[in-house]
Image (spheres, rainbow, N blue to C red):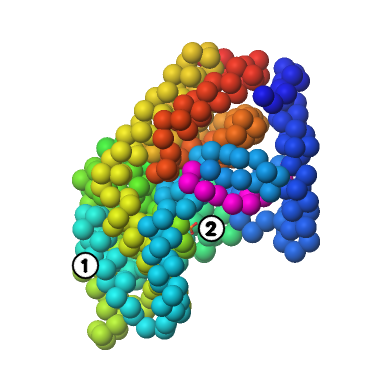
Amino acid sequence: MPDDSRQNFDAAAALADAEARLAAANPHSAAAHEAACKGMPGGNTRTVLFYPPFPLALARGEGCRLYDVDGHEYVDFQVEQTAGIYGHSEPIILDAVRDAMSEGITLGGPTLREGVLAEMFQQRFPAVEKVRFTNSGTEANLLALSTARAVTGREKLLGFQGSYHGSVISFGAYGNSMNVPFDWTYGRYNDVEATRQQIRELGSELAAVIFEPMTGSGGCIPATAEFVAMIREETERAGALMIMDEVMTSRLSPGGLHGLWGATPDLVSFGKYLGGGLTFGAFGGRADIMNRFDPSKPGAFAHAGTFNNNVLSLSAAIAGLGKVYTPEAAARLNGDGDILRGRLNDALKSAGVAGQVTGIGSMMMVHLTDKPLNGPTDADQVSPTLRGLIHLGLIERGYYVARRNMIVLSLPMGAAEMDGLVAAFKDVLATYKNVLPEA
Ligand SMILES: Cc1ncc(COP(=O)(O)O)c(C=O)c1O
């Protein structure tokens, strides 16, 4: 059991102690970080993975478990920010990738694979009449937004404060200085009337509205049915496109959240787990829009990308979606997530800590506040110190979660992992009770 004996001063002191304990217990990670700092700013090539004093360096993964370079074992509830749905050694996916490797990995022409995967997308996701593949969710969103600008001949785009759509389409925590210079207007997520007004004001200049049906990194806060219906109605009226970013959320039902809710976006973007654990993205939607990419037609839109049809991602994707993340598996995993979220909320209640665990199915986030959360900007109000305490508290107890307190399920998890996480969460709440907000 970790020594939390000095936790009673205040949250900042408790977090400083937790960081000191992490540093003391992980000399090899510390050394790896120091070495990485020589070649990369902050030793980092992916901002979201940094946390002080240094992130644990991971040695390997197996099933739903991770092992760091100091020999500690963790149950992996970070799940590669939702992309690791299959766990770390799914045999069907490993076989598919090995088979693909044995046939040559950079062939420079179409193979049988992209057509197969495209058909699977059509069958699975109702909004997808036609699809194209990319290498990341960022790229998928860039292409979807650029498509909207090209088909409408308009410049303006509406996104939502605090939302995240990729490394250069980020309206939240990382600031906007790296964003692509599109002509953005920012709305408030789930604010139906104010957004309606904004869309009407942008009117004939608006190319598209982009939003997640549930904010992923922005707090696991679902869009209300009224909000989605308003965006559908108002974009249609304005002659603009509705783009749903399902890069994270498409795992939440066999047909994504748009499928579950019967929503009808014009374009949808995908990524993460759909590549079977390899680099992946896709965008698709209405055939009349996507057909503009048909290269046999004069004046077709171009969509280049050396690795758009790379055989490793396509093979892993086909095996994963076809044989592993079946509709039945999706229903089971998301059902388990709903139960886990309920248990974590019960734990907060019985500990007398002000907080809530939001989400749908297999994606959830802990927020130590009892204020209503309507969108990412509300979730941002929770103190980063409290998020740090929950994060390191769970890590010390062997449960690896995202710094932002996001908890995600993967297929290899069972009752033992869920029970263990609930027990660890209860222990963190009891340990830090004096510095956590009271219910
Ligand atoms: C909602 C959403 N859209 C897009 C992206 C970008 O995907 P990628 O990291 O593959 O570029 C992410 C990544 O976290 C995301 O959560």
Question: Is 411 one of the magenta-colored residues?
Answer: no
Q: Which residue is mark 2?
A: 167
Which corner quadrant holds the N terminus?
A: top right
Q: Secondary structure at mark 2?
A: loop
How many angstroms separate mark 1 from mark 2 (CA)? 28 Å
Q: Height in image: 319 above or below 258?
A: below
Using the rendered image of the protein, determine whether residue 438 is visible from the camera's viewpoint.
Answer: yes
Q: Residue 241 sits in which quadrant?
A: bottom left
> Which residue sits at x=61%, y=56%?
46
Q: Where is residue 223 shown, x and y percent of the image?
A: 34, 39
Q: Secondary structure at mark 1?
A: helix
Query: In the image shown, does 237 or 59 lie closer to the viewer?
Result: 59
Q: Determine which of the numbered discs, if any, sits on residue 105 in the image.
A: none
Q: Residues within 10 Å of mark 2 (few under 14, many from 20)?
A: some
Judge: label 2 CB < 8 Å from ligand 1: yes
Using the rendered image of the protein, determine whether residue 136 is visible from the camera's viewpoint.
Answer: no
Query: In the image shown, does 11 or 299 lie closer to the viewer?
Result: 11
Q: How many marks?
A: 2
Q: Which residue is mark 1?
A: 287
Q: Where is residue 157 shown, x and y percent of the image?
A: 40, 58
Q: Which residues are magenta?
A: 53-64
> Which residue sits at x=25%, y=55%?
125
Amino acid type indicated by mark 1: Ala
